[in-house]
Image (cartoon, rainbow, N blue to C red):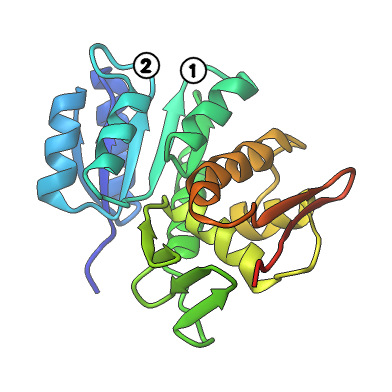
Amino acid sequence: MEPIKVLVVDDEPNIRDLLSTSLRFAGFSVHAVGNGVDAISAAEKGNPDIILLDVQLPGLDGFSITKKIRSMGMDIPILFLTAKDQTENKVLGLTVGGDDYMTKPFSLDEIVARINAILRRSRQVETEDAVLEVGEVRINQDAHEVFVNGNEVDLSPTEYKLLRFLMSNANRVLTKAQILDHVWEYDFNGEMGIVESYVSYIRKKLDPLTAEPVIQTKRGVGYMFKSTK
């Protein structure tokens, strides 16, 4: 079995080297770069399984790199690394297409746990039918493709998993705690704004293509995916 390929992007040589050495010791295959241009090129040519991406990079920052990677059609999971711990930064990072967020300093054990959790949810094998269809929205679970009335919609791996979870429980209200537990698989320290932002981001992609909004908010409870047909 080939080792998991990790692309490390950090402009600080000491952090870049420490991460590379530690992850290789943990059994990962690692390629490291120090700027946004090289990161985009390495993501395109190297086909990594996951990207560890520093947010505060000179020139292209981590968020801009993520937007570019997603615009190129690459759905590689992205784990942001940053010295900032504000909730709004986490929300921004995740809504531009990232999958997780870690604040420096961090331990190797935590990094490895987060990598494994992200890859587990992005590679989860479905035992159900290959096609999940609710109203106007259709998911090809084998290909991880989403269509709304025949129009393909690009989603990040975490957006995809959130939408699939909502659709798998159509016409049932899911609490934010249930969504956090299923989609992120660990405690976000009560930061329910992460769920709200992700739902808002998905709505912006789906609502222009549907007859009426398909994700409904149940105040004080959570969210429900409602069939429009």
Q: Is residue 142 left or right of residue 161?
A: left
Secondary structure beneath label 1? loop
User: Which residue shows up at 50% across the image and 45% down it?
Assistant: 109
User: Which of the labelled discs sits on residue 56, or is there none?
Assistant: 2
Please say if the residues under marks 2 and 1 sit with CB atoms less than 8 Å apart: yes
Kindly identify the residue that appears in the image at 48 percent across and 58 percent down.
160
Q: Quadrant of the C terminus?
A: bottom right
* Disc number placed over residue 145 in the picture, else none: none
Residue identified by numbered label 1: 83
In front: mark 2 or mark 1? Answer: 2
Can you say which quadrant of the picture contains the N terminus? Answer: bottom left
On screen, residue 181 versus residue 6, left or right, reads: right
The tag earlier along the polypeptide, 2 or 1, is 2
Residue 31 screen position, x and y as percent: 18, 42
Quarter of image, res 70: top left
Q: Is residue 21 above or below residue 148?
A: above
The amino acid sitting under disc 2 is Gln
**Kind of residue at badge 1:** Ala
Front one among 14 and 184: 184
